[in-house]
Amino acid sequence: MVLLSIIHTIVYTTSMKYYLRIFIRATVILFALIGFFLVAGYIAMRLGFTKTEGVEDLQNQSIANTIQRNKTYTVFPLEHTPEWIAFRQAVAKDKSMIDRVSIETGIPGRLLIAILVPEQMRLFHSNRAIFKRAFEPLKILGSQSQFSWGLFGIKDETARATEMHLKDTTSPFYLGKKFENILDFKTTDTGQERFQRIIDEHNHYYSYLYTALYVAQINKQWVKAGFPIDDKPAIIATLWNLGFQKSIPKASPLSGGAEIDINGTSYSFGSLAESFYYSDEMIELFP
């Protein structure tokens, strides 16, 4: 009996070690695969493989020209949807912060919201479960924290370029000495500090500030080239969506950008921003 007990213990122990080895190997392989896909995704983003060409709006000036002639508002196509109602209430909470950024940068609050509209509508409609569970009942804006950050989906390279243009006096995006230190860091770990301040879900100041400075820099570039676009929200929103590298001043720019599908209807990033800008939505908060 003692011998049988010893044999049983040996077999049991051997079996446990075998299954433990299998478990450890499977765990290592699983984490290796997760790491591979995360690294591959990051490399693809850095090299631009994840970017789409987007679409161009063939009549990008039609809304603006109609408004200027008739002094009327357009109808915003999403105004009665649950997503828009949640968005309105969430943005209203940030009004004082948006007004502060507007004063600091000279960029109108309504223009900032126009850029925020397609970013958030795309997020609300592509993440339905999160919208129903959090964004809608809590009336909060979506803040991204993976490859794009914060309310506006700011990419790391965009944030870095915005910071660099503030201090580079030879850059066509340079805004002047007044703005050189507006984004200065408080710590030596600038990468982590940049990330934390943009994704902060409780304080959206830097999300708005980086976006406003980007817009101001784009405007400066186009003014210097002789083609001001400060009255063209569709173009500004498109250039925000496409990035600094696509900002090439010219006489007749077209709006467009990423294609956003909302309930079976496709909008370009620029056209959706413009639709809000020239509507009477939130006019009492951001005229």
Image: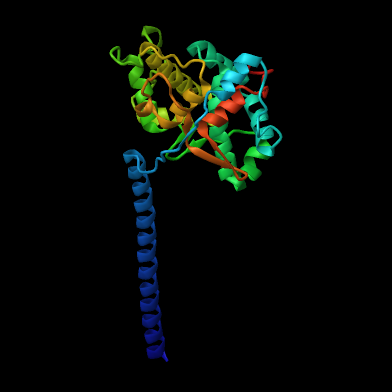
Q: Residue at x 67, y 24 (%)?
A: 281
How far from the left and from the top, in percent, is residue 70? 66, 15
Q: Residue at x 44, y 16 (%)?
A: 216
How far from the left and from the top, in percent, is residue 60? 52, 27
Q: Residue at x 50, y 32 (%)?
A: 57
Quarter of the image where one finds residue 158? top left
How far from the left and from the top, in percent, is residue 282? 67, 22
Task: Check the image and report above or below for 164 versus 9.
Answer: above
Question: Between residues 96 and 108, which one lies in front from this camera angle?
Answer: 108
Residue located farthest toward the right when viewing the structure as drawn? 80
Task: Check the image and report above or below for 224 versus 250.
Answer: above
Residue 202 shows in this picture: no
Quarter of the image where one finds residue 124? top right
Residue 186 shows in this picture: yes
Task: Check the image and report above or below for 210 versus 69.
Answer: below
Q: How many marks?
A: 0
Left or right: 8, with 98 as reference point:
left
Looking at the figure, which quarter contains the C terminus?
top right
How far from the left and from the top, in percent, is residue 265? 60, 42
Question: Between residues 68 and 98, which one lies in front from this camera angle?
Answer: 68
Looking at the figure, which quarter contains the N terminus?
bottom left
Quarter of the image where one finds residue 2? bottom left
